[in-house]
Image (cartoon, rainbow, N blue to C red):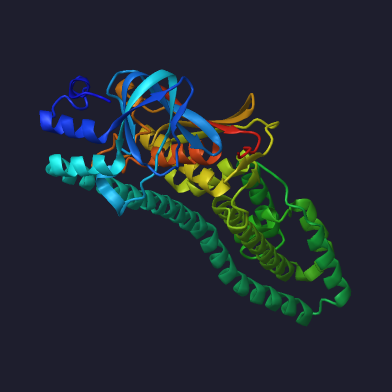
Amino acid sequence: MITSDELRGLFLFEALDEDQLDWLCAHGSVREAAEGEVVCTQGDPAEFLFVLLDGEISLSQLIQGHQLDIVTGSRPGVYAGAVQAYIGDRIEQKYGHTMRATRPSRLFALPARKFGKAVREWFPMATHLLEGTFFGMSTARRVIDQRERLTALGTITAGLTHELNNPAAAASRASAELGDHLARSQRRLAELASAGVDCERLSMLVSLRQKLTPATRSPLEISDAEDELGDWLEGHGVEDAWELSSGLVTAGIGTAEADEIAAVAGDHLPATMRWLAEVTEVAQLQTEISEATGRITALLDSARQYSQLDRAPHGRADLRDLLDSTLTMLRRKIGPDIRVVTEYDPGLPQVPVYAAELNQVWTNLIVNALDAMDGSGTLTVRTSRRGAHAAVEITDTGPGIPEENLGRIFTPFFTTKPVGQGTGLGLDISWRIIADRHQGDIQVESRPGTTTFLVLLPLTAPTTT
């Protein structure tokens, strides 16, 4: 049995009147728990509210097969168990933690339904406030969690669209010009044939064209070569010599090659040079199209890598590929005054991960780093091995996180951004993905000029129990 005087001495019940204390004594009971004894188990139906009378208890939570200690308390009056019984059957009433006695303890056990009835009847206004807070926070968290994911997707989509636009526009422009130059080159070839250039010499000219190799030169060397070839063409009676020289030099034609062409073309040198200029332009446009479509393919590969649409939900992945694909998707957000440094450990093995979810973590951390630097600074992405874990460090050179906020940055809805610019769930989502889904950890170190988020991921797949 327990007396009202003993309950009154607990901070949880000190404001209750004598009738209320007597009611608790009549409906509750005292339980003894030996050292190490489990009082209630996470996931079981929540049947009792437990209040510590004396001794010590600890709360732990099972996450991905591992029991993690959450808190230990020895102050009389600390409580756990069916703490949400006042909500009734509107939620599934299960113990959210496992409670264990860490030394011999006495606990007051109040049946959940009795506890729920007492709270609703004795504190109706508080009950409504608590219910509103619980359901409001649950709904807000669910909605904003989804919004965070959609916002990240929107950022990536905008960046990908912007990145695809440049090579797509280049390919479209080159393709439109290619048709005109192909038609002109065919007309130039027909002019050569109608002027009496026989098949043998045409074949020789084609062979000479195929042997041309563009040389890598500095801008000054190219300018000198164009001037030299322009003088040569003008001296050999070729009209528009200075307009033709630029394309011909790009194709690898200098005065030495021009002499070979003149030896084959004979009296038809001007028409031959105009034909070569058109053919050279065609080849250059084909190269531009090839480079543009190659860039589009590379971007789509990065997008597929980022989204992991062609992968199983869980599997081994190379962290370098995931980080690179995220940086590619965020390229539009990385301003011209942001320097990106990547330092990847080449010996780091693949890691068992949920790749698509992990990419959301990289997105959240990198976007936060870019926002912190406000358009100017250095973003460093580094991987390494730390014992049994793969480590990813994302460092920015922003102003740093105030010391008073360091302990709160992973708290849901906490944000230092202005109202309307941050939901306060990005780091909470990231923490849950790393800690809950991957059994890893996120740590942060910050001082003015340097902020580093460290993500630790197990190198081996967890063993579920």
Q: Position of residue 340 (x, y in %)?
A: 51, 35
Up-down: is 3 above or below 265?
A: above
Q: Is residue 181 left or right of residue 206?
A: left
Q: Residue furthest front?
A: 1
Q: Residue furthest right?
A: 200
Q: Position of residue 200 (x, y in %)?
A: 89, 73
Q: How many marks?
A: 0
Q: Which of 275 and 76 lies nearest the eye of the viewer?
A: 76
Q: Position of residue 236 (x, y in %)?
A: 72, 61
Up-down: is 199 above or below 270?
A: below
Q: Is residue 26 left or right of residue 158?
A: left
Tell me if I can see residue 448 in this picture: no
Residue at the (54%, 53%) spot, across then down? 307
Quadrant for the N terminus, please: top left
Residue at the (42%, 49%) spot, across then down? 152
Tell me if I can see residue 267 in this picture: yes
Residue at the (44%, 42%) spot, across then down? 44
- State which quadrant residue 287 falls in: bottom right
Q: Is residue 319 left or right of residue 91?
A: right
Up-down: is 396 above or below 222?
A: above
Q: Residue furthest bottom?
A: 194
Q: Which of 352 and 158 lies nearest the eye of the viewer?
A: 352
- State which quadrant residue 181 falls in: bottom right
Quadrant for the C terminus, please: top right
